[in-house]
Amino acid sequence: MLLSAVFGATDSPYLRVDGGPLVRVGRPERGSWSVATVRVRRATWWQWVRAEASGGRTFRARPAGAEHPEGTPGGTSDEAMAAAMAGSQTAAALVAAQLAAGRAPVGGAGLQVTADTGAARAAGLRAGDVLLAAGRRDRMAPLRAPADLEQAAARGGTVRLLVAPETSDEAWGAAAVRRTAAERLVAIPAGPDVSARAYPMGDVEGPSAGLLLALARIDDLAPGDLTGGRHIAGTGAIGFDGTVAGVGEVAEKVHSAVAAHVEVFFVPALQEAEAVSAARGTPLRVVPVRSVSDAVHWLCGNGGHAPTCRPLKR
């Protein structure tokens, strides 16, 4: 018996996945926004047995230099997970900048102004601003490469730019339309390596914070209270067009939200069944969404109020 107890308390070659803390972001008037996370920790043999018996998530630890299969929390390198968080932050900030201005996301990361030149200043731009799209009237084409600036300027005259301005806190403000002469446009130094953050996330990694980062940022950029006074959490990766993609460990994140007495949990639409099953018997309301705009629409119809509740411009 003693031998069994000692053996059970020793580390196994497995890691266990548990619900992690909810990380609050943004500054809503009354409610709260929280990113749901998970913890990955070494399991003793007893912990591994209990997890296996209860249907918990475990997986074999990665040997040094090896990769886990896709779909496990260790399925990508630490560098890739950090890069995924950086991409999630950038997408969240850009999508929020456009939705907060009442515009549908153009679907690209744009071009970031790299220097405060005369041409940039003449267009009302400064280093760090992001040029999302260019064109005339409301017909704007996404900007993905410097050559797109040349194409936008080819017809001459005045060009309209959709700009996400960099703010002093290393994030971006609500998008705005600027006008500039075509000949100045091609002289604006801008490149495709766009990066910034929506909110500090400490040591949280991976792409799954994107949806909640975007919602919290929209709420900060637009007047009103998009939460409707509710405590809201969720998970979901997002693209530059605002679409929401699936993520891992949904059930564990839902369990954390329930324990924290969250009222609403946003989840990628394709993972609704998993989230609903995990929340069964609790007061947590699971809301499936296919895009950030879907989430905003639901919030506007359930007590939220902000300019983003109006129809989007395209």
Image (tube, rainbow, N blue to C red):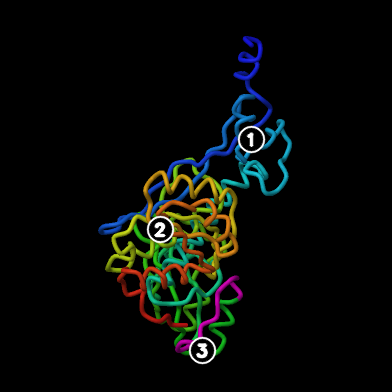
In this figure, which residue is indicated by the disc labeled 3? 156
Q: Residue 294: image x %, image y %?
A: 47, 71
Examine the rendered structure and indicate whether residue 36 appears above or below residue 309. above
The structure residue drawn at horizontal position 56% and vertical position 49%, both measured from the top left corner, is 206
Q: Secondary structure at mark 3?
A: loop
Give the residue type at disc 2: Val
Does residue 165 lie above or below 265 as drawn? below
**Foreground tag (1 vs 2):** 1
Marks 3 and 1 sit apart, C-alpha to C-alpha, by 69 Å
Which label belongs to residue 264? Answer: 2
Compare residues 81 and 230 and report the one nearer the observer. Answer: 230
Marked residue nearer the N-terminal end (1 or 2): 1
Q: Is residue 233 left or right of residue 108?
A: left
Q: Is residue 143 magenta?
A: yes
Identity of the residue furthest to the top in this view? 2
Instruction: Determine which residue is flagged by label 1.
Output: 53
**Which range of residues does the magenta coloring cover?**
136-147
Nearer to us: label 3 or label 2: 2
Counting labels gives 3
User: Which quarter of the rendered picture does the N terminus lie within?
Assistant: top right
Q: Position of residue 129 (x, y in %)?
A: 43, 65
Question: Nearest the camera: 296 or 192?
Answer: 296
Which x, y percent locates residue 258? Answer: 42, 48
Q: Give left or right: position of 11 versus 220.
A: right
Judging from the image, what secondary structure is the residue with disc 1 in?
helix
Q: Is residue 274 above or below residue 102?
A: above
Determine the image quadrant of residue 43. top right
User: For mark 2, does the 10 Å Cα neighbourhood hold few (<14), some (14 to 19), or many (20 or more) residues?
Assistant: many
Hey, what amino acid is under mark 1?
Ala
SS at mark 2 in the image: strand
Q: Is residue 221 visible?
A: yes
